[in-house]
Image (cartoon, rainbow, N blue to C red):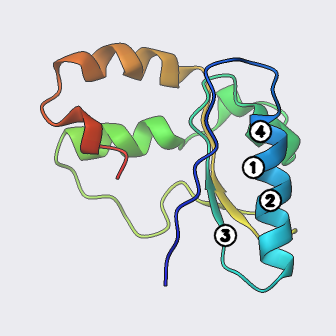
Amino acid sequence: MCRVIAVANQKGGVGKTTTCVNLGIGLARAGKKVLLVEADAQGSMAVSLGIAEPDELDVTLVNIMEKIINDEDVEPGEGIIHHTEGIDFIPANIELAGLEMALVNVMSRETILR
């Protein structure tokens, strides 16, 4: 059975990224399969998981969402990074801020992330 856990708050600096990373690693250590999806243009989760320059990544959440918006196929596992702590994650970077503006004109935009 799949469960989705979302950690969200408009205020910055309240520990969203730290909570997600630690909860994800804890669940992985408990034998669960974990996929963390970063939806923050600052790329803080990617940095905390060892990606020194998230802005230089070839595939991020933005690229996957753009393919979905344009009705292009997304390959299984595309954009997923496997971490030594036993979790998988899809990073984000500053390009996500630009995609937010583009989503304004997309039909059914609230379902794109699904």
- Dot 3 or dot 1: first in sequence order is 1
Q: Residue 86, can we see it? A: no
Counting from the top left corner in percent of width and height, residue 19 is at 81, 46
Secondary element at image label 2 = helix
Q: CA distance from mark 1 to mark 2?
A: 5 Å
Q: Nearer the viewer, mark 3 or mark 2?
A: 2
Residue 100, located in which quarter of the rendered image? top left
Is residue 34 shown above or below 53?
below
For mark 2, does the 10 Å Cα neighbourhood hold few (<14), some (14 to 19), or many (20 or more) residues? Answer: some
Neighbor class of circle 1 (other Cα within 10 Å; few <14, some 14-19, many 20+) is some
Looking at the rendered structure, the kind of residue marked 4 is Thr
- Residues under numbered marks 4 and 1 in contact, where contact means CB atoms less than 8 Å apart: yes
Mark 2, residue position: 23
**What SS does tag 4 mark?**
helix
Q: Disc 4 designates what residue? A: 17
Q: Give the residue displayed 36% in from the left and 41% down from the top.
A: 65
Image height check: is 34 above or below 37?
below
